[in-house]
Image (cartoon, rainbow, N blue to C red):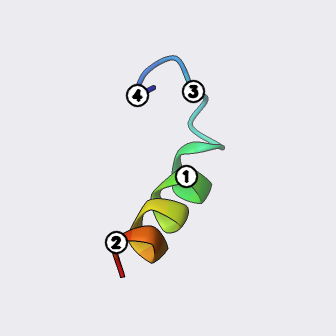
Amino acid sequence: MSGSTPRSKVPRTEQLVQECKG
């Protein structure tokens, strides 16, 4: 998933991952 996704989508994905981890 990393690399294939654009830099503009990177921050949004990171925020979702952090929320999932809680």
* Alpha carbons under labels 3 and 4: distance apart: 6 Å
Label 1 crowding class (10 Å Cα cut-off): few <14, some 14-19, many 20+?
A: few
Label 4 to label 2, Cα distance in Å? 18 Å
Circle on res. 5 = 3
N-term mark: 4 or 2: 4
Please give the residue where the numbered disc 4 appears in the rendered image: 2
Instruction: Give how far across and how far down residue 5 sits, in percent.
Output: 57, 26
Mark 1 and mark 3 in contact (Cβ < 8 Å)? yes
Res 8 quadrant in image: top right
Residue 3 found in image quarter: top left
The Cα atoms of the two marked residues, 3 and 1, are separated by 9 Å
Mark 3 residue type: Thr
Give the camera-side residue of 7 and 12.
12
In whole angstroms, how far apart are the C-alphas of marks 1 and 4?
10 Å
Residue type at mark 2?
Lys
Which class describes the residues within 10 Å of circle 3: few (<14), some (14-19), or many (20+)?
few
Task: Please identify the residue farthest to the top as the structure is shown.
Answer: 4
As helix, strand or loop, the secondary structure at mark 3 comes to: loop
Q: Which residue is mark 1?
A: 13
- Measured as percent of width and height from the top left, residue 9 is found at 64, 43
Q: Which residue was labeled with disc 2? A: 21
Residue 11, compared with residue 5, is above or below; it is below
Callout 3 touching callout 4 (CB < 8 Å): yes
Circle 4 crowding by C-alpha within 10 Å: few under 14, some 14–19, many from 20 = few
Q: Which mark is residue 22?
A: none
**Secondary element at tag 2:** helix
In contact (CB < 8 Å): disc 4 and disc 2: no
Closest to the observer, 4 or 22 = 22
